[in-house]
Amino acid sequence: MSGKLVVVSNRIPTGDTPSGGLVVALHGALEQSGGLWVGAHPDTAGPGDTGLTEIDRGSYTRLAFHLSEAEYDSYYLGFANSVLWPLCHGRADLVELERSYEEGYMAVNRRVARLLADKIEPDDTVWVHDYHFLPLAGELRKLGVSARIGYFLHIPFPPLSALSTLPSPDDFADWLASYNLIGLQTRRDTARCLEMFRSDPRAEFMTDGTVKFQDRVVSVRSFPIGIEVDRFAEAAATPTDAADLGADMGEQLVIGVDRLDYSKGLPNRFRAFGEYLDRKPEDAPRASLLQVAPPTRERVAAYRAIRAELEEIAGRLNGAHSELDWTPIRYIHHAVDRDLLAVLYRRAEACLVTSLADGMNLVAKEYVAAQDPEDPGVLILSRFAGAGEDMTEALLVNPYDVSEMAEAIATALSMPLEERKRRHAACLRVVRDSDVSGWAQRFVDCLRNCVPTLAYDGLP
Ligand code: ADQ
C-alpha cells in the first residue's frame, strides 16, 4: 500500500459533511490513507501569520495557510485571477501585468512549499490543483521532496501564442515539468500542452509518450472531470416544496447557472434569448430565462464590468418584453442550494451553457444528470466548453453567434420527445463515464504508476 494522499488546492473544504464533487471524490482516498488536504484559509490574516492551522478536525487532516491582505491581492486577485485566468481563457486583453503580482505568486508558492515539505514522505502521493499553484512542485523539489507529485489544471490550457503574454514565458513549461503527471480536462488541452513542450528546446519526447525536460520526466494526459451523477439525479427527482417553483416562470423555462465571470458568455446568452423572444411566433408558449449568477472576484475590474453590462442588458430586455404577469429574464445574484438547483434543472425545458472558454463546465453535466429520461430537457452547449468535446449530442453552438444561439433556443423548446430522449441518452452516457469518483481514482492510479523522480538538480 502506498503512503498517504496529500491534496493541495486554493480552497479547502470546511465542515464535517463532504459537499461539492471534488471533495466527495477525494474524501474516500483521503480517509483511507490518513490523508492531508492543504489550502488557503477563507479569512485573510495579518502579515505575521505564516504557519498552518488545523481546521475542522475530521476523518482526515485539513491544514490551512493564511494569506495576508497583500498576498491575497498579489497572489490570488493579482497573478492567479488577473494574469493566469484571463490568459488561459483567451482574454489576453484583460491581463494586468504588475511585478508585485508575480512576486506575490512566487512568494506564496514558496511559503506553501516550505510549510508542506516536511509533512510529505517519499511514498506519499501529492495532488496539486489548479492555476494557483503552477510552481509548487518545483519549489517542493528544491526542498528535497521526491514523492510523486501530480497536477490537475481545471481551466483551459493556454495556446502557445498566449504564453508569450507572461512576464517570463519560459517559466510555464519549467513549472509544469517538475510534476510527474499533468492532468488536463480535454484532448484539446493535452494537445496544447504537448505543443508547448514540442516547441521548447529544453524538452524531448520519449518513445513511451512521456516528455523529458532537462533532468525531469513528465506525463501529460486528459482526465475529463465529472459530477456525482447519482446524487444529482436523486436530488432532482426528490419532490420538494420547490416543485411548484415554476408556476410563475412562464410555460417554458430556460435555465443558466454560472459564477458571474466574463468567460461564461453571459451577455451574448441574454442577447440570444432576447432575439429568440423577438422572433418567436405569437402562438408559441411563453418562455422565461432563469439565470443564477452570483458575482465573484468583485475587486477585479473586469468582474465589475461584466456585472454592470449584464444588468444593463437584462434591464433593457425586460423593459421591452415584460408583461403585467410575466418577466422574461429572472436574474438571481446569489448561490442556490444544490438540491434546489437539481430540482430547477429538471423543471427547465432547456439549459444554456454558452462559455467563450471553459475547462469543462459542470453545469452542463449537472443539467443532463438531473433530467427525467422519459421527458428530458435539451442542453444547449458552447463548442468552446470542455464538455462539448464529448457531449456531441447536445445542441452545440458558437457562443459568439447570437442568432445561432437564438435558433438553438427555438429548436430546443420545440424538439420532439423522441429526439430529446435520444440526445439525452447519449449525453448521459458521457456524464456517467466521467463520474467524479472514477475521475479521481483514475488520476491517483495514474500518478502512482508514474516514473518516480530520480534526479533533480535542486536536490540537496
Ligand atoms: P467553474 O468556473 O466554477 O469551475 P463549473 O464547472 O460550471 O465552473 O462549476 C461551477 C459549479 O458551481 C457547479 O457545480 C455549479 O452547480 C455550481 N454553481 C455555479 N453557480 C451556482 C449558483 N448560483 N448556486 C449554486 N451553485 C452554483 C472550474 C472551471 C470549469 C471546471 C470546474 C471543475 O472553470 O471549467 O469544469 O472548475 O474542474
Image (tube, grey):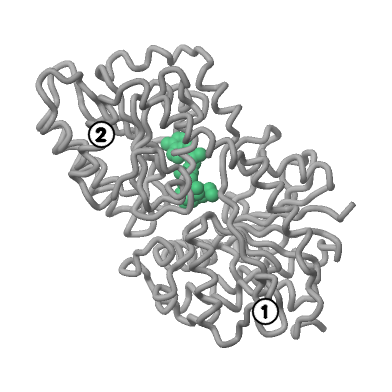
Residue at the spot of label 1: 212
- Name above or below for residue 247 compared with residue 329: above
Q: Residue 416: horizontal and vertical position, in percent? A: 31, 22
In the visual, does 434 lie left or right of 390?
right
Q: Secondary structure at mark 1?
A: strand
How many marks on residues?
2
Q: Nearer the viewer, residue 286 or 12?
A: 286
Which residue reaches farthest bottom? 201
Residue at the spot 48% in from the left edge and 29% down from the top edge? 425
Residue at the spot 15% in from the left edge and 36% down from the top edge? 317
Instruction: Assess disc 1: are there few (<14), some (14-19) or many (≥20) residues with their C-alpha within 10 Å of its C-alpha.
Output: some
Q: Quadrant of the C terminus?
A: bottom right
Label 1 amino acid? Lys
Q: Residue 396: horizontal and vertical position, in percent? A: 34, 44
Q: Nearer the viewer, residue 24 or 101?
A: 24
Q: Secondary structure at mark 2?
A: helix
- Name above or below for residue 106 compared with residue 337: below
Instruction: Assess disc 2: are there few (<14), some (14-19) or many (≥20) residues with their C-alpha within 10 Å of its C-alpha.
Output: many
Label 2 amino acid? Ile
Q: Nearer the viewer, residue 278 or 198?
A: 198
In the visual, does 129 lie left or right of 300?
right
Q: Residue 458: horizontal and vertical position, in percent? A: 75, 83
Q: Which of disc 2 and disc 1 is earlier in sequence?
A: 1
Residue at the spot of label 2: 409
- Name above or below for residue 307 compared with residue 44: above
Quarter where residue 291 is shown: top left
Q: How far apart are the alpha carbons under marks 1 and 2?
A: 48 Å
